């Protein structure tokens, strides 16, 4: 490794390497100004129920990049803001579940993430009904 570094210093100028790295960083920054569309699992907290919904999102590269690095953040949405239908329990004594309307969920997410456009939602999982949930 030392021989390689000595050879590299002899034939490649440190100024060239510094300018090459700077040009790569500038190129990367300019590419982030374009609009991109990507798949992303949006993390939600709906009245205490934690779910992930697969989405197709669109936005400027800088906005998508900053949104993706906020890994631990969940979007909080009260269940009262969503259009839901009650799904009866499959077995006697089971818990009542709620099915969330995709359009109302998409609208609720879009309001909270204004710089990114939610293009489409994947399958929305059922959540426990907070009004009848067993504690």
Image (spheres, rainbow, N blue to C red):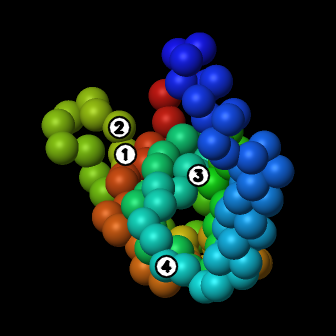
Q: Position of residue 101 (x, y in %)?
A: 44, 74
Q: CA distance from mark 1 to mark 3?
A: 20 Å
Going from N to C along the chain, the mark reached first, 4 or 2, is: 4
> Is 61 left or right of 58, judged from the image as shown?
right
Going from N to C along the chain, the mark reached first, 1 or 3, is: 3
**Disc 1 element:** loop
Q: Residue at x 49, y 79 (%)?
A: 37
Q: Residue at x 40, y 61 (%)?
A: 54
Q: Is residue 61 above or below residue 15?
A: below
Q: Residue furthest left?
A: 91
Q: CA distance from mark 3 to mark 4?
A: 20 Å
Query: Is any part of residue 120 visible from this angle?
Result: yes
> Is 79 left or right of 55, judged from the image as shown?
right
| Comparing labels 1 and 4, the label whose residue is closer to the camera | 4
Q: Position of residue 63 (x, y in %)?
A: 72, 70
Q: Which residue is mark 4?
A: 37
Q: Are marks 1 and 2 in contact (CB under 8 Å)?
A: yes
| Comparing labels 3 and 4, the label whose residue is closer to the camera | 4
Going from N to C along the chain, the mark reached first, 3 or 4, is: 4
Q: Quadrant of the C terminus?
A: top right
Q: Position of residue 77 (x, y in %)?
A: 68, 58
Q: Which residue is mark 2?
A: 95
Going from N to C along the chain, the mark reached first, 1 or 4, is: 4
Q: Which residue is mark 3?
A: 44
Q: Residue at x 28, y 52 (%)?
A: 88
Query: Is any part of residue 18 visible from this angle?
Result: no
Q: Which residue is mark 1?
A: 96
Q: CA distance from mark 4 to mark 2?
A: 38 Å
């Amino acid at each position: 490794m030392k021989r390689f570094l000595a050879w590299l210093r002899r034939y490649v100028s440190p100024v060239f390497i510094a300018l090459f790295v700077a040009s790569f960083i500038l190129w990367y920054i300019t590419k982030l100004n374009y609009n991109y569309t990507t798949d992303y699992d949006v993390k939600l907290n709906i009245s205490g129920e934690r779910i992930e919904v697969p989405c197709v999102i669109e936005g400027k590269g800088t906005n998508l990049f900053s949104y993706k690095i906020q890994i631990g953040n969940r979007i909080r949405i009260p269940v009262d803001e969503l259009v839901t239908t009650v799904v009866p329990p499959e077995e006697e004594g089971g818990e009542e579940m709620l099915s969330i309307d995709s359009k109302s969920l998409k609208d609720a997410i879009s309001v909270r993430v204004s710089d990114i456009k939610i293009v489409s939602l994947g399958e929305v999982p059922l959540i426990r009904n907070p009004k009848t949930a067993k504690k």
